[in-house]
Image (cartoon, rainbow, N blue to C red):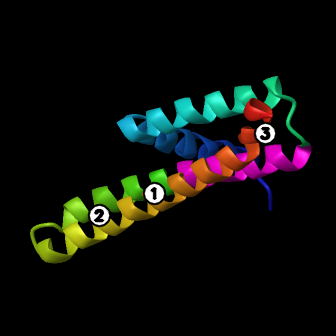
Amino acid sequence: MFSFRDFFRSLRYALMGLRFVWRENNFKIQVFCALLVVFLMFFLGLSRLEKVALLICIIAVLVLESLNTIFEHLSDILKPRLHDYVKIIKDIMAASVLITSLGAVVIGLIIFWPYFFN
């Protein structure tokens, strides 16, 4: 059964997690870039489909950066026992954020290019 009390408790935990991930410098940079993109989306009058594509990219990058933070902290807990694998896990997670970010930049360039250079 639905409970507002449980819902708001879950929401509070989620906001605490968001506050924690906000401490990461890369997350702050990505949020700044996301806000810039959102501003340009509305300033340039992009189509609904273009806006949706960009929002999906923004969400994907921020979610992966959050997951990267999770894996980094979990890896630090395991470090004394599995030190060889910890570096590999951290590097793979960082690579996944990089790949997603580069993909988002490419999609952003494809969408914004005609608005700036036509």
Residue under pointer 1: 97
Q: Position of residue 2 (x, y in %)?
A: 80, 56
Examine the residues drawn in magenta and state their main secondary structure: helix
Q: Earlier in the sequence, mark 3 or mark 2?
A: 2
On the rendered structure, is 63 left or right of 78?
A: right
- How far apart marks 3 and 2 lie (CA) works out to 37 Å
On the rendered structure, is 113 left or right of 101?
A: right
SS of the residue at dot 2? helix
Residue 59 visible? The answer is no
Front disc: 1 or 3: 3
On the rendered structure, is 4 left or right of 23?
A: right
Q: Which amino acid does label 1 sit on?
A: Val
Q: What residue type is labelled 2?
A: Lys
Q: Position of residue 62 (x, y in %)?
A: 55, 48
Disc 1 crowd, CA 10 A, few/some/many (<14, 14-19, 20+): many
**Which label number is shown at residue 90?**
2
Q: Where is residue 36 in the image (x, y as percent from the top left)?
A: 63, 28
The range drawn in magenta is 48-62
Residue under pointer 3: 114
Front disc: 3 or 2: 3
SS of the residue at dot 1? helix
